[in-house]
Amino acid sequence: MAETRSLVALLPRPVRTLPADLAAVFALVVLTNVAALAPVLRETSLRVPLGLAFVLFVPGYAFIAALFPEAGDDPTADPEADGDSDGDLADGANRGPLPVGSFLDDRSGIDGIERVALSFGLSIAVTPLIGLVLNFTPWGIRLTPIMLAISAFTVGAAAVAAVRRWELPPDERFRVPYRTWYAAGRAELFEPDTRADAALNVVLVLSLLLAVGSVGYAVAVPPDGEQFSAVYLLTEDDDGEFTADNYPTEFTRGESKEIVLGVDNHEHRTVDYTVVLVEQRVSVEDNETTVEEQRELDRFETRLGHNESWHHQHELEPTMTGENVRLVWLLYPGGDVPEEPSADTTEYSAHLWANVSEE
């Protein structure tokens, strides 16, 4: 115990005096970023509960903590329970009903229930606004920029909240009553007044375990549905938009033209992809296509999560000449490419017919 206290004493004073709830905010920000961006952890289900809390609650809580650093009054308490504030009524005298809104006007800060409700509401409002701002930046709406932007907002608001609390007298600062909650919960669970309360406690615990198990199973087990990948070709129009039209089909040997390769992942897991671009000289007889000659032109690799897409612009330069040269993009999920890649070794491919003339 003494060794632990000595280690704590080595920490800077702002860290040692940081309120527990704000320290939990900082810790959750770090854990969520690690779970969402770390190469190994981002593939686990840990990022789901952390991400939900990070997006739906934590930013709003930090913002509310910065706005209201003082402790709030209990909305169910009698403001004159400890005595007559005006001094003009004797103890025990009938004061009569309070004017509507008089108690709310005298309250300072907000209570715990209001903080929780406003935290959810502000988080739901702030997170889309951050995404809207990122949409007009060069980074766009992607995982890393969103994580960094929300983290910066949350950490900044929590830092302001900590400073504002330190400026208040200790008895006026907001504190989360962890010990009171723990004592009340322990007494309610392990010291019930009646057998009926004990039975209800058992049902409550079983219900919580069932709910947590159901959510964990839903997160850990991939959802049912078709699992597949896709490869396709696109071109860029005059407006800079990708379209499945106007493919380059006329080439001169040594000339290259730009084309866009697209890959979609619907495998319900993260997949490493390899795309092999080959050119083929083929012959068609009786509706059967025979590959007479094949050359590999290029290879592309990418890594995609579930429901992610990848668009890659590259130069297409055939080396074979003649009419109806077939250019084929062969997609291999998992990255395992056979020694002789062909349409027979993968179920995902896209092709383009081209006429290539001599220089």
Image (spheres, rainbow, N blue to C red):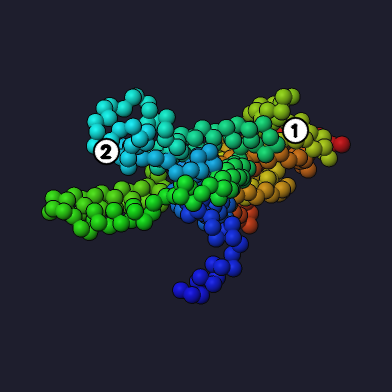
Could you tell me which residue is drawn at 55 percent across and 70 percent down?
7
- Residue 31 makes an appearance in the image: no
Q: Residue at x 20, y 58 (%)?
A: 191
Q: For label 1, count other residues whose C-alpha is less than 10 Å away and answer few (under 14), some (14-19) or many (20+).
A: some
For the residues labelled 2 and 1, the Cα–Cα distance comes to 103 Å
Residue sitting farthest toward the right? 359
Residue at (80% x, 38% y) in the render? 256
Q: Residue 167, which numbered label?
A: none
Q: Nearer the viewer, mark 2 or mark 1?
A: 2
Q: Percent x, y for residue 102?
A: 38, 28
The residue singled out by tag 2 in the image is: 91
Q: Quadrant of the C terminus?
A: top right
Look at mark 1 in the image and give the residue it sits on. 355
Image x and y of residue 57, in percent: 47, 42
Disc 1, SS: strand
Residue 85 as seen in the image, left or right of residue 192: right
Q: Which residue occupies the foreground of this view, 98 or 144?
A: 98
Q: Residue at x 28, y 35 (%)?
A: 90
Left or right side of 280 for 211 = left
Work out whether residue 248 or residue 134 is closer to the camera in this orientation and state it. 134
